[in-house]
Image (cartoon, rainbow, N blue to C red):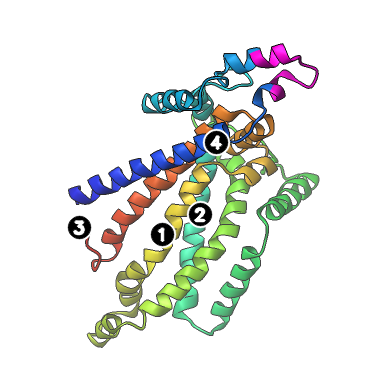
Amino acid sequence: MLRFLVRRVFLGVVTMWVVSTAVFILYFVAPHHVAQTLAGRQATAQTIALIAHRLGLDRPILDQYGSYLWRLLHGNLGYSYVNNESVTTIIKQDLPVTASVAIGGAVLWLIIGVVSGVVAATHPRSAADRTVTGFALFFYSMPTFLLGELCLLVLFYELHLAGVTFFPGSGYVPLTQDPYQWFVHMILPWITIALVTAATYSRLTRGSMLDVLGEDYIRTARSKGLAERRVVYRHGLRSALTPVLTQFGIDLGTLLGGIIITETVFGLPGLGAQIYNAISRQDLPVIIGLVLLASAFIVAANILVDIGYAVLDPRVRLS
């Protein structure tokens, strides 16, 4: 296990270096007019040159790359071109919002997806199977922004007209400030993310469960007289969750990097909104910092997924 972890962490570090280098090439070597954008259309050439010099954009590329890697090694993601605020500070401010939406939504979609997938797989070609499949296809085809707007229309606007003010339409309350209000403000974003994403997990779980329930060791367990519930959940589901775990690691890592559409629809000041603003203003340090953060989450999620394989499936051994 220790050798496996060391090897995976090393590969993760190499991956992060490749990503950081690719990001540098994309945003610093490719033609940009950052100084011109920050200076404005009416700026003189001298003003543009002064801004480029202050930001270090007039230095040789290799010199910029060396400084860039040195800052990353020391945990310094730089400062925003727009307000000169530390990128690390920006991430610390906005990450709790995105983490609240992503983790809560992930727990909800995992429960809905796995439970509905197991029900469909254990009752193939039944009314329950067709119902689960129909709902999965419906929500799988539903754009996130459309489902979010429908939630706002039905659960916020219409209920408010009827005098029910339980669901807030937008905003965020920190968990440390008021846990109840935090929970209430997260319900609609969680529902939006969970219903769209759970469709994928329902289909994955159903397909994987159908394959596993046809294996020889499942038939052997049944022939020994084990209860069907134990056969399905103790032996079948544990092995069937391997592809679900893979998808979960990728999805959660991606969401933690920023949920642009959901945060925009519900007015949440998270990393998704920060990414949108940074791209609009060509704020390169913020863009780079958020890209690296998302990459780090995905790398970490993949390491945890590999470890989870051995926990879920005894046939998998880490070496």
Range drawn in magenta: 36-49
- Say whether residue 302 is left or right of residue 126: left
What amino acid is labelled 2 in the image?
Leu
- Say whether residue 224 is left or right of residue 156: left
Sequence-wise, which precedes: disc 4 or disc 1? 4
Q: Name the residue under label 4.
A: 97
Between the C-alphas of marks 4 and 3, the distance is 38 Å
Point 43% across, 23% down: residue: 67
39 is within the stretch colored magenta:
yes
What amino acid is labelled 4 in the image?
Val
Residue 269 visible here: no
Q: Mark 2 points at which residue?
A: 108
Q: Residues within 10 Å of mark 3 (few under 14, many from 20)?
A: few
Q: Mark 1 points at which residue?
A: 246
Q: Mark 3 points at which residue?
A: 319
Percent of width and height locating residue 257 = 51, 41
Between the C-alphas of marks 4 and 2, the distance is 17 Å
- Say whether residue 309 is left or right of residue 70: left
Q: Quadrant location of residue 132?
A: bottom right
What amino acid is labelled 1 in the image?
Thr
